Image: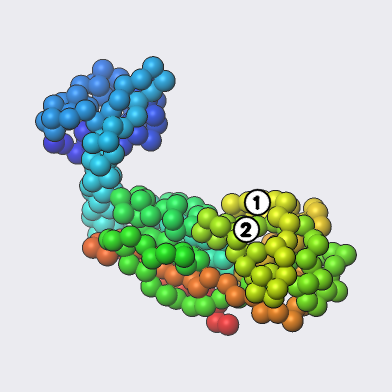
Amino acid sequence: MKLDQLQHLIAIVEQGSLRAAAKRLDVPQPALTRSIRSLEKELGVDLFARQTTGMSLTAEGRRFQVRASAIVNEARRAKEEIQLVRGDYEGTVSAALSIMPHVGMLPSTLPVFNRTYPKVRLRISENLLPAVESALREGSVDFYLGAAPHQSPSAGLTMQHLCDNTRVVVGRKNHPLLKATHLKELAQADWATTAIDYNAEEDLARLFGNYQLPAPRVMFQARSAMSVLVALAQTDLLAMLPVQWIHNPMTRDLLQAFSLEEKIPAPSIVLVRRVDLPLTPPAEFFCDVLLRNLPTR
């Protein structure tokens, strides 16, 4: 079993077909076919189901792909760390952040990181833990920082509580309901939700239910900060967002927080990473600089 065979398998999985993988890797398609067939012969199983529309992993292939991804990513990290020692490091740091760190922590972190590692590529995704668990285990994502999930991560990952947080109800500037001081005054409004785990709408309904109020109407669902910002700025929708939104320069001139009597809790902020492997020095530095910008309240 060779490393390039594992790299070929990962490329086919990511691209969905031999042709696309061969193009991305700049490898002749017949050579890629021979590589995978040789790997399957060595393992004694079919890793892919060949179809007219492309290639998909078999059950055995899915199990093997998890291990293969971890090996390929650790090989990449090992190479990058050697480059770091030589002084010609040009690797990649990959992190998954929820909306709060994107808005409240990342803006101050980027200039510091870029000055220290000007040749390192940052690959940042706006995501939540359940969606990136497999990528963390495989090593394609270095760490997750953001809203705590409702359930602890699976074996092989460690979760560190960093801080608690709060949320506010947010709407556009000069919103017609801006003078409201209680949630009950907002019960008939239309709402937008962002993803906290996979049940943000239930999260909003739970908040209203705690005050014996019916669940509000959710008319807009988004999985990105940009989608929420556009929706709130251009409509009368309301949203329940981390308090950091009202302090960010990109949002504070467009949005305004409601001064409500009710306190609105937010998920804790956590850091999740693999138990068994250390971060590369640039990834460790990026994580450390992010943590310097944790909310103090």
In the displayed structure image, the side of residue 111 where residue 40 appears, left or right: left
Query: In the figure, residue 42 lies in which quadrant?
Result: top left
Q: Residue at x 23, y 46 (%)?
A: 67
Q: Residue at x 65, y 51 (%)?
A: 221
Viewport quadrant of the N terminus:
top left
The correct choice, above or below, for 8 with respect to 220 in the image is above
Distance, label 1 to label 2, CA atoms, is 9 Å
Measuring from the top left, give residue 43's x and y in whole percent: 13, 33
Question: Foreground mark, 1 or 2?
Answer: 2
Q: Residue at x 51, y 59 (%)?
A: 197
Cβ–Cβ under 8 Å for marks 1 and 2: yes
The residue that label 1 is drawn on is 221
In the displayed structure image, the side of residue 218 where residue 178 appears, left or right: right
Q: Residue at x 66, y 70 (%)?
A: 209
Q: Residues within 10 Å of mark 1 (few under 14, many from 20)?
A: some
- Disc ID at residue 201: 2
Identify the mark nearer the N-term, 1 or 2: 2
Q: What scheme was used to colour the molecule?
A: rainbow
Measuring from the top left, give residue 156's x and y in whole percent: 27, 61
Kind of residue at disc 2: Glu
Kind of residue at disc 1: Gln
Res. 122 in view: no
The correct choice, above or below, for 263 with respect to 88 in the image is below
